[in-house]
Image (cartoon, rainbow, N blue to C red):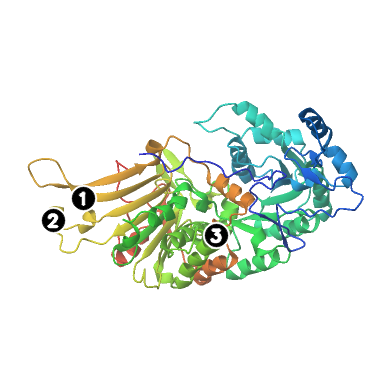
Amino acid sequence: MAAFSSMHCPPPYSSSINGGKNRSFIFSASPRFSVPAKAKVFVQSPGNSHQNAVLMQDGAVAAKVSPVEKETPIEKLKGDLLSVTSSKEWDEETGFDINENESTVSIMVVGASGDLAKKKIFPALFALYYEGCLPKHFTIYGYARSKMTDAELRNMVSKTLTCRIDKRENCGEKMDEFLKRCFYHSGQYDSEENFAQLDKKLKEHEGGRVSNRLFYLSIPPNIFINAVKCASMSASSGNGWTRVIVEKPFGRDSESSAALTKALKQYLNEDQIFRIDHYLGKELVENLSVLRFSNLIFEPLWSRQFIRNVQLIFSEDFGTEGRGGYFDHYGIIRDIMQNHLLQILALFAMETPVSLDAEDIRNEKVKVLRSMRPLQLEDVVIGQYKSHTKGGVTYPAYTDDKTVPKDSLTPTFAAAALFIDNARWDGVPFLMKAGKALHNKRAEIRVQFRHVPGNLYNRKFGTDLDQATNELVIRVQPDEAIYLKINNKVPGLGMRLDRSNLNLHYAARYSKEIPDAYERLLLDAIEGERRLFIRSDELDAAWSLFTPVLAELEEKKIIPEYYPYGSRGPVGAHYLAARYNVRWGDLGVEQSA
């Protein structure tokens, strides 16, 4: 079965002098207006010696020579050759700089010395470069408070770069070329002077071209606004677009989130802000809408008539381990459920959008979030992992972390039941479960369908009808897969039924390595594609669901249920599911999946 299309990058972002494919418009931070990228207005003086000039693709300028009577072919060729003027001569005579019609992208990694930059952002940028997805003219600048030279940055970055397993041609050569485009500038995050110095260096690299600038804020949220203010005032593009990628958390409740958004909009327009949730860049999350909207067998079943419950499960087999101080301020609900899992839920449950345009998709997601019932305390279970010894190895409790207060009540596990009060999903429980220090590492969506009414084979399944329920599982990570659980007859003379999987296992089906989520999201930000980024009203709707219950948990000082490190989590999660006649789908071990 042939693939619909191989993984490829869009046409190069950088346009040639004839325009290329630059989404037809250049979006400028200041002033606020749009100019077609291909348009260039010439005001010619009567004395211009190039009144009939034609701009050639290679940058030279050829004059239209009037025909000469009885001109021989040799004479005509000689005249044409003499009429070609170099681009440099043309610049000098007309004041027109050909570079002005070319664009360049400068990518600033703010917080370049941090773990996220080293482990994710720089490797993702290199992968895009290796695949030929970055424009012809691009520059990468690391910016942080640490004192570092360009050579030291390149040495640091080089240790984290790898090439695709299935594409290692010229890997070392590509790395060297990429590192030559990487530079470093040391400065304070709240210093307009330091950002002005960065701006000067950027202009040297941009060389008079249309400058497009992308700032990736890989820094703590308490210094977002200072960095955005300084970048906007002192280092934004004067003739191209300026965009800012903001990492979560986007506040810790409705009030702080709204304050952050308001502060950002003092210096940026909404279409310049790219709120990144890397889970939306996961391959299987991307495939969710394709699976539903391009396969006739699924869309008619995607409703309360056929679906009994939906489960969104996230588990990690390790604890906070070094992030205790950060994590204790937010907890598992803010860290995972309010963003990653809720975003997946919105994509899963939304109505068919008018088009694949970013705004159409985000409009439908917002409708889902606004239709959701406010989360109640009785529909939430929280837990915290405790110390546990297994196989002679003692695993620490959450509060054993030196950066965590000994009396901390911050949950490292949470389960919740959510409901969407609309015609499609009325009464269907959406169960979320997220936790650290559990028995495995997994992120998946499980769709459990209703029992077959009047099933002729009920007796063959015994009393546990859940074993006969069809289930669609979308495993986001690790070992990506989509499989559908069906009932079938075991070969033989008897009538014995078995449960099997129709399995699309990505590693077996596709030889190509799956790109990291950050690669897709960075490329989308460069291209101006906002479909996988979070809009401000979407963020408001998400926080309005969780803020009341979070406040109640903290005000009442609800004590979390303790569970052993490496276990399946608190028992209370099973009672919560049972209340809605649901069994967690990840309890069994699926060998064939």
The vertical placement of 423 against 13, above or below, is below
Work out which quarter of the rendered image holds the N terminus and state it. Answer: top left
Dot 2 or dot 1: first in sequence order is 2
| Residue that label 1 marks | 487
> Of the residues shown, which amino acid type is indicated by label 1?
Asn
Amino acid on which disc 2 is placed: Tyr
Residue 59 figure quarter: top right
> Residues at badges 3 and 1 in contact (C-beta under 8 Å)?
no
**Marks 2, 3: nearer the viewer:** 3
Viewer-proximal residue among 581 and 382:
581
Q: Which residue is tagged 3?
A: 358
Q: CA distance from mark 2 to mark 1?
A: 10 Å
Mark 2 or 3, nearer chain start: 3
Q: Residue 457, which numbered label?
A: 2
User: Is mark 2 in CB contact (under 8 Å) with mark 1?
Assistant: yes
Q: Residues within 10 Å of mark 3 (few under 14, many from 20)?
A: some
Tell me if mark 2 has few (under 14), some (14-19) or many (20+) residues whose alpha carbon lies within 10 angstroms of its own: few
Foreground residue, 478 or 232?
232
Q: Vertical placement of 364 versus 247: above or below?
A: below
Q: Is residue 574 placed above or below 105 in the rendered structure? A: below
- Please tell me whether mark 2 sits on a helix, a strand or a loop: loop
Q: Residue at x 57, y 51 (%)?
A: 324
Q: Residues within 10 Å of mark 1 (few under 14, many from 20)?
A: some
Q: Say which element carries label 3.
A: helix
The mark closer to the camera, 3 or 1, is: 3
